[in-house]
Amino acid sequence: MGSDPRPDRPSPKTGRHRTIIEPFKIKVVEPLALRTPEQRALNLKRAGYNLFLVPAGEVTFDFLTDSGTTAMSAAQWGAMMVADESYAGSQSFERFERVVRAVTGFQHVIPTHQGRAAERLLFSVLLQPGMKVPSNNHFDTTRANIEQLGAEAVDLVIAEGRDPADLHPFKGNIDLARLERFCSENRGRIPLGMLTITNNTGGGQPVSLANVRGAAEVYRRHGIPFLLDACRFAENSYFVKLREPGRSLSSAREIALETFAQADGCLMSAKKDGLSNIGGFIALREDRWLDRLRSQLILTEGFPTYGGLAARDLEALAVGLEEVLDERYLEYRLATARYMAEGMNRLGIPTVQPPGGHAVYIDVKAFLPHIPPHEFPGQALVCELYRREGVRSCEIGSAMFGKFTAGKFIPAAMELVRLAFPRRSYTQSHFDYVLEGLASLADERTSIRGMRLSYEPPYLRHFTARFEPLGPAESTP
Ligand SMILES: *Cc1c(COP(=O)(O)O)cnc(C)c1O
Protein backbone atom coordinates (compact mmCIF):
# COMPACT_ATOMS: atom_id res chain seq x y z
CA MET A 1 0.00 0.00 0.00
CA GLY A 2 1.63 3.27 -1.05
CA SER A 3 0.69 5.78 1.54
CA ASP A 4 1.52 9.32 2.38
CA PRO A 5 3.62 9.96 5.45
CA ARG A 6 0.86 11.30 7.71
CA PRO A 7 -0.70 10.75 10.16
CA ASP A 8 0.34 7.23 11.10
CA ARG A 9 3.98 6.60 10.47
CA PRO A 10 5.26 3.40 11.95
CA SER A 11 8.42 3.47 14.05
CA PRO A 12 11.57 4.31 12.08
CA LYS A 13 12.29 1.81 9.37
CA THR A 14 15.64 1.20 7.86
CA GLY A 15 14.42 0.31 4.37
CA ARG A 16 14.13 2.52 1.30
CA HIS A 17 10.51 1.63 0.60
CA ARG A 18 7.35 3.66 0.91
CA THR A 19 5.07 0.81 -0.05
CA ILE A 20 3.66 -1.25 2.80
CA ILE A 21 3.47 -4.73 1.30
CA GLU A 22 1.31 -7.70 2.22
CA PRO A 23 3.64 -9.48 4.67
CA PHE A 24 2.79 -12.93 3.33
CA LYS A 25 2.85 -14.97 0.17
CA ILE A 26 -0.03 -17.09 -0.98
CA LYS A 27 -0.21 -20.89 -0.85
CA VAL A 28 -3.91 -21.56 -1.35
CA VAL A 29 -6.12 -19.52 -3.66
CA GLU A 30 -9.81 -19.41 -4.49
CA PRO A 31 -11.29 -17.96 -7.68
CA LEU A 32 -12.91 -14.52 -7.69
CA ALA A 33 -16.47 -14.47 -9.04
CA LEU A 34 -16.22 -12.20 -12.07
CA ARG A 35 -19.59 -11.12 -13.42
CA THR A 36 -20.80 -8.44 -15.82
CA PRO A 37 -22.77 -5.44 -14.57
CA GLU A 38 -25.78 -6.86 -16.45
CA GLN A 39 -25.57 -10.17 -14.56
CA ARG A 40 -25.25 -8.29 -11.31
CA ALA A 41 -28.23 -6.07 -12.13
CA LEU A 42 -30.26 -9.25 -12.52
CA ASN A 43 -28.93 -10.61 -9.20
CA LEU A 44 -29.95 -7.37 -7.50
CA LYS A 45 -33.44 -7.58 -8.86
CA ARG A 46 -33.79 -11.19 -7.73
CA ALA A 47 -32.51 -10.27 -4.24
CA GLY A 48 -34.97 -7.40 -3.80
CA TYR A 49 -32.02 -4.98 -3.84
CA ASN A 50 -30.86 -6.34 -0.50
CA LEU A 51 -27.20 -7.36 -0.53
CA PHE A 52 -27.72 -9.80 2.37
CA LEU A 53 -29.85 -11.80 -0.09
CA VAL A 54 -27.28 -11.90 -2.92
CA PRO A 55 -25.45 -15.27 -2.98
CA ALA A 56 -21.77 -14.90 -1.95
CA GLY A 57 -20.80 -16.76 -5.13
CA GLU A 58 -22.00 -13.75 -7.12
CA VAL A 59 -19.85 -11.26 -5.16
CA THR A 60 -16.38 -10.29 -6.39
CA PHE A 61 -15.15 -8.23 -3.43
CA ASP A 62 -16.95 -9.13 -0.23
CA PHE A 63 -16.56 -6.21 2.15
CA LEU A 64 -19.74 -6.98 4.09
CA THR A 65 -17.79 -7.76 7.28
CA ASP A 66 -14.34 -8.46 8.69
CA SER A 67 -15.87 -11.04 11.04
CA GLY A 68 -14.92 -14.67 10.48
CA THR A 69 -13.66 -13.87 6.98
CA THR A 70 -9.91 -14.06 7.73
CA ALA A 71 -7.62 -16.06 5.48
CA MET A 72 -5.81 -18.45 7.80
CA SER A 73 -2.09 -19.11 7.67
CA ALA A 74 -0.31 -22.34 6.76
CA ALA A 75 0.66 -22.57 10.45
CA GLN A 76 -3.01 -22.41 11.47
CA TRP A 77 -4.05 -25.07 8.98
CA GLY A 78 -1.14 -27.22 10.12
CA ALA A 79 -2.14 -26.86 13.77
CA MET A 80 -5.70 -27.90 12.91
CA MET A 81 -4.41 -31.22 11.62
CA VAL A 82 -2.76 -32.11 14.93
CA ALA A 83 -5.74 -31.05 17.06
CA ASP A 84 -6.75 -33.31 19.93
CA GLU A 85 -10.51 -33.79 19.60
CA SER A 86 -10.95 -35.44 23.03
CA TYR A 87 -14.20 -34.49 24.72
CA ALA A 88 -12.57 -33.61 28.04
CA GLY A 89 -9.10 -32.31 28.84
CA SER A 90 -8.08 -31.80 25.22
CA GLN A 91 -4.43 -30.82 24.68
CA SER A 92 -5.67 -28.30 22.14
CA PHE A 93 -7.54 -26.53 24.93
CA GLU A 94 -4.38 -26.46 27.05
CA ARG A 95 -2.52 -24.86 24.19
CA PHE A 96 -5.31 -22.31 23.56
CA GLU A 97 -5.49 -21.50 27.28
CA ARG A 98 -1.72 -21.01 27.44
CA VAL A 99 -1.80 -18.51 24.59
CA VAL A 100 -4.80 -16.57 25.94
CA ARG A 101 -3.08 -16.36 29.33
CA ALA A 102 0.16 -15.17 27.75
CA VAL A 103 -1.49 -12.55 25.51
CA THR A 104 -4.02 -11.18 28.02
CA GLY A 105 -2.48 -11.95 31.40
CA PHE A 106 -5.87 -13.34 32.53
CA GLN A 107 -5.74 -16.68 34.30
CA HIS A 108 -9.21 -18.12 33.71
CA VAL A 109 -10.27 -18.90 30.15
CA ILE A 110 -13.75 -19.94 29.00
CA PRO A 111 -14.10 -20.80 25.31
CA THR A 112 -17.34 -20.02 23.43
CA HIS A 113 -18.42 -20.53 19.83
CA GLN A 114 -18.35 -16.77 19.11
CA GLY A 115 -18.46 -13.37 20.77
CA ARG A 116 -22.20 -13.11 21.40
CA ALA A 117 -22.21 -16.46 23.21
CA ALA A 118 -19.59 -15.04 25.59
CA GLU A 119 -21.82 -11.99 26.07
CA ARG A 120 -24.96 -13.99 26.73
CA LEU A 121 -23.12 -16.20 29.21
CA LEU A 122 -21.48 -13.41 31.20
CA PHE A 123 -24.52 -11.15 31.26
CA SER A 124 -26.87 -13.97 32.29
CA VAL A 125 -24.68 -14.45 35.36
CA LEU A 126 -24.19 -10.75 36.22
CA LEU A 127 -27.26 -8.78 35.11
CA GLN A 128 -30.68 -8.22 36.68
CA PRO A 129 -33.52 -6.11 35.27
CA GLY A 130 -33.02 -2.39 35.90
CA MET A 131 -29.22 -2.58 35.96
CA LYS A 132 -27.00 -0.46 33.71
CA VAL A 133 -23.82 -1.23 31.78
CA PRO A 134 -21.72 1.72 30.57
CA SER A 135 -19.23 1.54 27.66
CA ASN A 136 -17.83 3.82 24.95
CA ASN A 137 -20.24 2.25 22.43
CA HIS A 138 -21.86 -1.13 22.82
CA PHE A 139 -21.80 -3.31 19.72
CA ASP A 140 -25.29 -4.41 18.47
CA THR A 141 -25.15 -7.94 19.88
CA THR A 142 -23.72 -6.69 23.18
CA ARG A 143 -26.54 -4.18 23.52
CA ALA A 144 -29.15 -6.77 22.52
CA ASN A 145 -27.84 -9.30 25.06
CA ILE A 146 -27.90 -6.68 27.82
CA GLU A 147 -31.38 -5.39 26.94
CA GLN A 148 -32.75 -8.90 26.54
CA LEU A 149 -32.19 -9.29 30.31
CA GLY A 150 -34.05 -6.08 31.10
CA ALA A 151 -30.87 -4.08 31.77
CA GLU A 152 -29.73 -0.94 29.96
CA ALA A 153 -26.66 -0.53 27.70
CA VAL A 154 -25.35 3.04 27.99
CA ASP A 155 -22.98 4.65 25.45
CA LEU A 156 -20.59 7.30 26.79
CA VAL A 157 -18.15 7.85 23.89
CA ILE A 158 -16.46 11.29 23.72
CA ALA A 159 -18.23 13.98 21.67
CA GLU A 160 -15.49 13.88 19.00
CA GLY A 161 -16.36 10.22 18.44
CA ARG A 162 -19.81 11.23 17.21
CA ASP A 163 -18.57 13.79 14.67
CA PRO A 164 -17.64 12.10 11.34
CA ALA A 165 -15.26 14.92 10.34
CA ASP A 166 -13.35 15.26 13.62
CA LEU A 167 -9.70 14.18 13.39
CA HIS A 168 -9.20 13.20 17.06
CA PRO A 169 -6.63 10.34 17.12
CA PHE A 170 -8.63 8.29 19.66
CA LYS A 171 -12.27 8.77 18.74
CA GLY A 172 -13.15 5.55 20.57
CA ASN A 173 -12.32 7.07 23.98
CA ILE A 174 -14.97 7.05 26.67
CA ASP A 175 -15.90 10.40 28.21
CA LEU A 176 -14.29 10.03 31.65
CA ALA A 177 -16.16 12.95 33.24
CA ARG A 178 -19.51 11.57 32.12
CA LEU A 179 -18.48 8.08 33.23
CA GLU A 180 -17.58 9.39 36.70
CA ARG A 181 -20.93 11.16 36.98
CA PHE A 182 -22.79 8.13 35.64
CA CYS A 183 -21.17 5.82 38.19
CA SER A 184 -21.95 8.21 41.06
CA GLU A 185 -25.57 8.63 40.01
CA ASN A 186 -26.18 4.90 39.53
CA ARG A 187 -24.47 3.50 42.59
CA GLY A 188 -25.39 -0.13 43.21
CA ARG A 189 -26.95 -0.57 39.78
CA ILE A 190 -23.79 -1.17 37.69
CA PRO A 191 -22.66 -4.81 37.93
CA LEU A 192 -19.90 -4.28 35.35
CA GLY A 193 -18.38 -1.54 33.21
CA MET A 194 -17.09 -2.06 29.70
CA LEU A 195 -14.94 -0.53 26.96
CA THR A 196 -14.88 -1.72 23.33
CA ILE A 197 -11.45 -1.82 21.64
CA THR A 198 -11.44 -0.75 18.88
CA ASN A 199 -14.83 0.95 19.00
CA ASN A 200 -16.66 -0.95 16.24
CA THR A 201 -19.95 0.94 16.38
CA GLY A 202 -18.07 4.23 16.31
CA GLY A 203 -16.22 3.25 13.10
CA GLY A 204 -13.40 1.02 14.36
CA GLN A 205 -11.87 3.97 16.19
CA PRO A 206 -9.14 3.26 18.74
CA VAL A 207 -9.11 3.90 22.48
CA SER A 208 -5.91 5.33 23.99
CA LEU A 209 -4.10 3.49 26.74
CA ALA A 210 -4.46 6.60 28.90
CA ASN A 211 -8.22 6.41 28.43
CA VAL A 212 -8.32 2.68 29.26
CA ARG A 213 -6.34 3.52 32.42
CA GLY A 214 -8.69 6.41 33.22
CA ALA A 215 -11.79 4.25 32.81
CA ALA A 216 -10.20 1.55 34.98
CA GLU A 217 -9.59 4.11 37.75
CA VAL A 218 -13.19 5.31 37.66
CA TYR A 219 -14.54 1.76 37.73
CA ARG A 220 -12.13 0.77 40.54
CA ARG A 221 -13.05 3.80 42.62
CA HIS A 222 -16.71 2.77 42.39
CA GLY A 223 -16.00 -0.92 43.01
CA ILE A 224 -17.26 -1.88 39.52
CA PRO A 225 -15.63 -4.81 37.69
CA PHE A 226 -14.14 -3.71 34.34
CA LEU A 227 -14.43 -5.95 31.28
CA LEU A 228 -12.95 -5.15 27.87
CA ASP A 229 -14.80 -6.07 24.68
CA ALA A 230 -11.47 -6.96 23.08
CA CYS A 231 -12.45 -8.13 19.56
CA ARG A 232 -9.85 -5.90 17.92
CA PHE A 233 -7.30 -5.61 20.73
CA ALA A 234 -4.31 -6.01 18.40
CA GLU A 235 -5.47 -3.32 15.97
CA ASN A 236 -6.10 -1.05 18.97
CA SER A 237 -2.63 -1.75 20.34
CA TYR A 238 -0.97 -0.82 17.06
CA PHE A 239 -2.96 2.43 16.88
CA VAL A 240 -1.65 3.20 20.39
CA LYS A 241 1.91 2.52 19.22
CA LEU A 242 1.45 4.85 16.23
CA ARG A 243 -0.52 7.64 17.85
CA GLU A 244 -0.08 7.81 21.61
CA PRO A 245 2.85 9.95 22.76
CA GLY A 246 5.68 7.93 24.28
CA ARG A 247 4.43 4.57 22.98
CA SER A 248 6.34 4.21 19.71
CA LEU A 249 9.06 2.05 21.27
CA SER A 250 6.70 -0.42 22.93
CA SER A 251 5.69 -3.51 20.98
CA ALA A 252 2.06 -4.16 20.10
CA ARG A 253 2.29 -7.17 22.38
CA GLU A 254 3.49 -5.10 25.34
CA ILE A 255 0.77 -2.52 24.72
CA ALA A 256 -1.87 -5.26 24.55
CA LEU A 257 -0.67 -6.73 27.86
CA GLU A 258 -0.67 -3.31 29.48
CA THR A 259 -4.20 -2.68 28.16
CA PHE A 260 -5.51 -5.97 29.56
CA ALA A 261 -3.66 -5.28 32.82
CA GLN A 262 -6.07 -2.39 33.49
CA ALA A 263 -9.13 -4.66 33.36
CA ASP A 264 -10.59 -7.52 35.38
CA GLY A 265 -11.31 -9.55 32.28
CA CYS A 266 -12.40 -9.49 28.67
CA LEU A 267 -14.96 -10.76 26.20
CA MET A 268 -13.69 -11.64 22.78
CA SER A 269 -15.08 -12.50 19.38
CA ALA A 270 -12.08 -14.36 17.98
CA LYS A 271 -13.60 -14.01 14.50
CA LYS A 272 -11.83 -10.65 14.42
CA ASP A 273 -8.35 -10.42 15.93
CA GLY A 274 -8.26 -14.16 16.62
CA LEU A 275 -7.56 -14.46 12.86
CA SER A 276 -10.03 -17.34 12.72
CA ASN A 277 -13.34 -18.14 11.08
CA ILE A 278 -15.16 -18.96 14.31
CA GLY A 279 -14.58 -18.73 18.07
CA GLY A 280 -14.67 -16.54 21.12
CA PHE A 281 -13.89 -16.53 24.82
CA ILE A 282 -14.26 -14.95 28.22
CA ALA A 283 -11.00 -14.44 30.13
CA LEU A 284 -10.95 -13.37 33.80
CA ARG A 285 -8.32 -12.40 36.35
CA GLU A 286 -10.22 -13.81 39.34
CA ASP A 287 -12.30 -16.91 39.80
CA ARG A 288 -15.36 -15.40 41.51
CA TRP A 289 -17.88 -15.98 38.68
CA LEU A 290 -16.19 -19.05 37.31
CA ASP A 291 -18.36 -21.83 38.68
CA ARG A 292 -21.59 -20.19 37.58
CA LEU A 293 -20.15 -19.40 34.15
CA ARG A 294 -18.94 -22.96 33.65
CA SER A 295 -22.26 -24.54 34.62
CA GLN A 296 -24.08 -22.19 32.22
CA LEU A 297 -21.47 -23.00 29.58
CA ILE A 298 -22.12 -26.74 29.90
CA LEU A 299 -25.84 -26.09 29.54
CA THR A 300 -25.64 -24.24 26.20
CA GLU A 301 -22.14 -24.31 24.67
CA GLY A 302 -20.41 -27.46 25.83
CA PHE A 303 -17.78 -28.82 28.20
CA PRO A 304 -15.36 -26.17 29.58
CA THR A 305 -12.46 -27.46 27.48
CA TYR A 306 -14.17 -26.87 24.13
CA GLY A 307 -17.13 -24.50 24.68
CA GLY A 308 -18.96 -25.04 21.41
CA LEU A 309 -15.80 -25.28 19.30
CA ALA A 310 -13.97 -28.17 17.71
CA ALA A 311 -10.45 -28.64 19.07
CA ARG A 312 -9.15 -27.73 15.61
CA ASP A 313 -10.79 -24.30 16.03
CA LEU A 314 -8.99 -23.89 19.36
CA GLU A 315 -5.71 -24.75 17.62
CA ALA A 316 -6.35 -22.21 14.85
CA LEU A 317 -7.07 -19.60 17.52
CA ALA A 318 -3.97 -20.40 19.54
CA VAL A 319 -1.86 -19.71 16.45
CA GLY A 320 -3.98 -16.75 15.27
CA LEU A 321 -3.76 -14.90 18.59
CA GLU A 322 0.03 -14.95 18.30
CA GLU A 323 0.15 -14.08 14.59
CA VAL A 324 -2.14 -11.09 15.00
CA LEU A 325 0.46 -9.35 17.19
CA ASP A 326 3.11 -9.49 14.45
CA GLU A 327 3.79 -5.82 13.76
CA ARG A 328 4.48 -6.35 10.07
CA TYR A 329 0.98 -7.74 9.84
CA LEU A 330 -0.54 -4.90 11.91
CA GLU A 331 1.27 -2.24 9.90
CA TYR A 332 -0.18 -3.73 6.71
CA ARG A 333 -3.59 -4.22 8.31
CA LEU A 334 -4.04 -0.58 9.34
CA ALA A 335 -2.60 0.55 6.00
CA THR A 336 -5.46 -1.18 4.16
CA ALA A 337 -8.28 0.98 5.55
CA ARG A 338 -6.12 4.09 5.35
CA TYR A 339 -5.21 3.40 1.70
CA MET A 340 -8.84 2.88 0.71
CA ALA A 341 -10.04 5.95 2.61
CA GLU A 342 -7.35 8.18 1.09
CA GLY A 343 -8.05 6.76 -2.37
CA MET A 344 -11.76 7.49 -2.03
CA ASN A 345 -11.17 10.97 -0.64
CA ARG A 346 -9.00 11.77 -3.68
CA LEU A 347 -11.97 10.82 -5.88
CA GLY A 348 -14.22 13.16 -3.92
CA ILE A 349 -15.93 10.39 -1.94
CA PRO A 350 -16.17 11.64 1.66
CA THR A 351 -15.48 9.13 4.44
CA VAL A 352 -15.63 9.19 8.22
CA GLN A 353 -12.32 10.60 9.48
CA PRO A 354 -9.79 9.39 10.38
CA PRO A 355 -10.15 5.86 8.93
CA GLY A 356 -10.53 3.17 11.62
CA GLY A 357 -8.76 -0.17 11.76
CA HIS A 358 -11.02 -2.57 9.94
CA ALA A 359 -13.33 -0.57 7.70
CA VAL A 360 -14.02 2.58 5.70
CA TYR A 361 -17.34 4.38 6.15
CA ILE A 362 -18.65 6.48 3.26
CA ASP A 363 -20.55 9.59 4.38
CA VAL A 364 -23.48 9.16 1.99
CA LYS A 365 -25.32 12.31 3.04
CA ALA A 366 -22.35 14.31 1.79
CA PHE A 367 -21.75 12.10 -1.28
CA LEU A 368 -25.35 11.81 -2.59
CA PRO A 369 -27.06 14.96 -1.26
CA HIS A 370 -29.68 14.73 -4.03
CA ILE A 371 -31.26 11.62 -2.46
CA PRO A 372 -33.34 12.41 0.65
CA PRO A 373 -33.10 10.02 3.64
CA HIS A 374 -36.59 8.56 3.08
CA GLU A 375 -35.35 7.33 -0.31
CA PHE A 376 -32.52 5.38 1.38
CA PRO A 377 -29.40 6.93 -0.18
CA GLY A 378 -27.13 4.40 1.55
CA GLN A 379 -29.10 1.46 0.16
CA ALA A 380 -28.94 3.05 -3.30
CA LEU A 381 -25.15 3.34 -3.00
CA VAL A 382 -24.73 -0.22 -1.72
CA CYS A 383 -26.62 -1.44 -4.81
CA GLU A 384 -24.57 0.71 -7.20
CA LEU A 385 -21.30 -0.49 -5.63
CA TYR A 386 -22.41 -4.03 -6.28
CA ARG A 387 -23.85 -3.50 -9.77
CA ARG A 388 -20.81 -1.63 -11.07
CA GLU A 389 -17.94 -3.22 -9.15
CA GLY A 390 -19.14 -6.48 -7.63
CA VAL A 391 -18.42 -4.96 -4.19
CA ARG A 392 -20.64 -6.04 -1.32
CA SER A 393 -20.86 -3.42 1.41
CA CYS A 394 -23.24 -2.71 4.27
CA GLU A 395 -25.69 0.14 4.67
CA ILE A 396 -25.69 1.70 8.14
CA GLY A 397 -28.30 4.41 7.81
CA SER A 398 -32.01 4.83 7.29
CA ALA A 399 -32.50 1.39 5.71
CA MET A 400 -31.12 -0.14 8.93
CA PHE A 401 -32.33 2.34 11.56
CA GLY A 402 -34.98 4.62 9.99
CA LYS A 403 -38.43 4.40 11.60
CA PHE A 404 -41.98 5.01 10.48
CA THR A 405 -43.93 6.56 13.35
CA ALA A 406 -47.55 7.61 12.84
CA GLY A 407 -47.06 7.69 9.08
CA LYS A 408 -43.99 9.89 9.37
CA PHE A 409 -40.47 8.77 8.46
CA ILE A 410 -37.78 9.38 11.09
CA PRO A 411 -34.39 8.99 9.40
CA ALA A 412 -31.23 7.61 10.99
CA ALA A 413 -28.77 10.14 12.46
CA MET A 414 -26.17 9.35 9.79
CA GLU A 415 -26.30 7.77 6.34
CA LEU A 416 -23.22 5.56 6.15
CA VAL A 417 -22.04 2.74 3.91
CA ARG A 418 -19.39 0.50 5.45
CA LEU A 419 -16.72 -1.37 3.54
CA ALA A 420 -15.16 -3.78 6.07
CA PHE A 421 -12.01 -5.57 5.00
CA PRO A 422 -11.45 -9.27 5.62
CA ARG A 423 -7.98 -9.93 7.06
CA ARG A 424 -5.24 -11.15 4.66
CA SER A 425 -7.79 -11.95 1.93
CA TYR A 426 -7.50 -9.26 -0.74
CA THR A 427 -4.34 -7.76 -2.24
CA GLN A 428 -3.43 -4.24 -3.21
CA SER A 429 -4.32 -4.82 -6.87
CA HIS A 430 -7.84 -5.75 -5.77
CA PHE A 431 -8.10 -2.48 -3.86
CA ASP A 432 -6.66 -0.51 -6.80
CA TYR A 433 -9.16 -2.16 -9.12
CA VAL A 434 -12.04 -1.16 -6.85
CA LEU A 435 -10.74 2.41 -6.63
CA GLU A 436 -10.56 2.64 -10.45
CA GLY A 437 -14.22 1.65 -10.62
CA LEU A 438 -15.14 4.11 -7.89
CA ALA A 439 -13.71 6.93 -10.01
CA SER A 440 -16.50 6.55 -12.60
CA LEU A 441 -19.10 6.07 -9.88
CA ALA A 442 -17.96 9.34 -8.31
CA ASP A 443 -18.20 11.11 -11.69
CA GLU A 444 -21.72 9.82 -12.32
CA ARG A 445 -23.02 10.17 -8.77
CA THR A 446 -25.88 12.49 -9.73
CA SER A 447 -27.42 9.74 -11.90
CA ILE A 448 -27.90 7.48 -8.86
CA ARG A 449 -31.59 7.26 -7.85
CA GLY A 450 -33.21 6.58 -4.50
CA MET A 451 -35.18 3.49 -3.48
CA ARG A 452 -38.48 2.57 -1.95
CA LEU A 453 -39.13 -0.14 0.61
CA SER A 454 -41.35 -2.87 -0.89
CA TYR A 455 -41.31 -5.40 1.97
CA GLU A 456 -40.55 -4.77 5.61
CA PRO A 457 -40.16 -7.60 8.15
CA PRO A 458 -41.17 -6.97 11.79
CA TYR A 459 -37.60 -7.22 13.20
CA LEU A 460 -34.07 -6.38 12.08
CA ARG A 461 -35.23 -4.94 8.80
CA HIS A 462 -31.89 -4.81 7.05
CA PHE A 463 -31.39 -8.58 6.85
CA THR A 464 -34.52 -9.46 4.90
CA ALA A 465 -36.20 -6.24 3.67
CA ARG A 466 -36.80 -5.75 -0.04
CA PHE A 467 -36.45 -2.57 -2.05
CA GLU A 468 -37.24 -1.20 -5.51
CA PRO A 469 -35.33 1.50 -7.36
CA LEU A 470 -37.29 4.69 -7.98
CA GLY A 471 -37.68 5.74 -11.60
CA PRO A 472 -36.39 9.17 -12.67
CA ALA A 473 -39.90 10.67 -12.62
CA GLU A 474 -40.72 9.41 -9.12
CA SER A 475 -37.85 10.75 -7.12
CA THR A 476 -37.94 14.14 -5.56
CA PRO A 477 -34.97 16.11 -6.84
C1 LIG B 1 -18.34 -8.94 16.35
C2 LIG B 1 -18.43 -8.27 17.63
C3 LIG B 1 -19.11 -8.85 18.71
C4 LIG B 1 -19.92 -10.14 18.58
O1 LIG B 1 -19.14 -11.20 18.18
P1 LIG B 1 -19.70 -12.39 17.26
O2 LIG B 1 -18.52 -13.30 17.16
O3 LIG B 1 -20.12 -11.81 15.96
O4 LIG B 1 -20.83 -13.03 17.98
C5 LIG B 1 -19.09 -8.17 19.91
N1 LIG B 1 -18.48 -6.99 20.05
C6 LIG B 1 -17.81 -6.40 19.03
C7 LIG B 1 -17.11 -5.10 19.24
C8 LIG B 1 -17.78 -7.00 17.78
O5 LIG B 1 -17.13 -6.41 16.78
Image: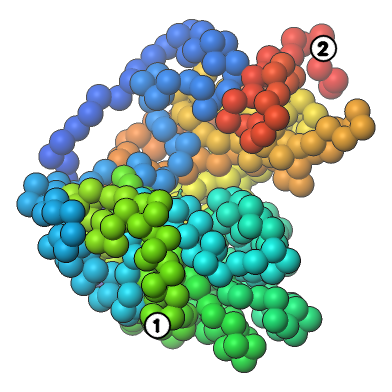
Q: Position of residue 395 (x, y in %)?
A: 61, 36
Residue 367's place in the image compared with 351, above or below, is: above
The answer to which of 439 and 79 lies nearer the viewer is: 79
**Left or right side of 194 for 60:** left
Residue 126's place in the image compared with 330, above or below, is: below
Residue 33's disc number = none
On the rendered image, what quadrant is the C terminus found in?
A: top right
Q: Quadrant of residue 451?
A: top right
Q: How many marks?
A: 2
Q: Is any atom of residue 30 visible in this view? A: yes
**Left or right side of 335 for 196:** right
Mark 2 or 1: the one toward you: 1
Q: Position of residue 307 (x, y in %)?
A: 31, 56
Identify the amino acid type marked 2.
Answer: Glu
Q: Position of residue 263 (x, y in %)?
A: 47, 80
Residue 168's place in the image compared with 436, above or below, is: below
Asked whether disc 2 touches disc 1, contact meaning CB atoms under 8 Å apart, the reply is no
Residue topped by disc 2: 474
Q: Is any atom of residue 451 visible in this view? A: no
Q: Secondary structure at mark 2?
A: loop
Q: Quadrant of residue 325?
A: bottom left
The answer to which of 335 and 404 lies nearer the viewer is: 404
Report the Cα–Cα distance between label 2 and label 1: 62 Å
Residue topped by disc 1: 286
Identify the amino acid type marked 1.
Answer: Glu
Q: What colouring does the structure picture have?
A: rainbow
Residue appearing at x 52%, y 67% in the figure: 125
Residue appearing at x 53%, y 25% in the figure: 51
Q: Position of residue 435 (x, y in %)?
A: 46, 34
Residue appearing at x 92%, y 32% in the figure: 406
Whether ligand 1 has any atom under 8 Å from the Cβ at mark 2 is answered as no
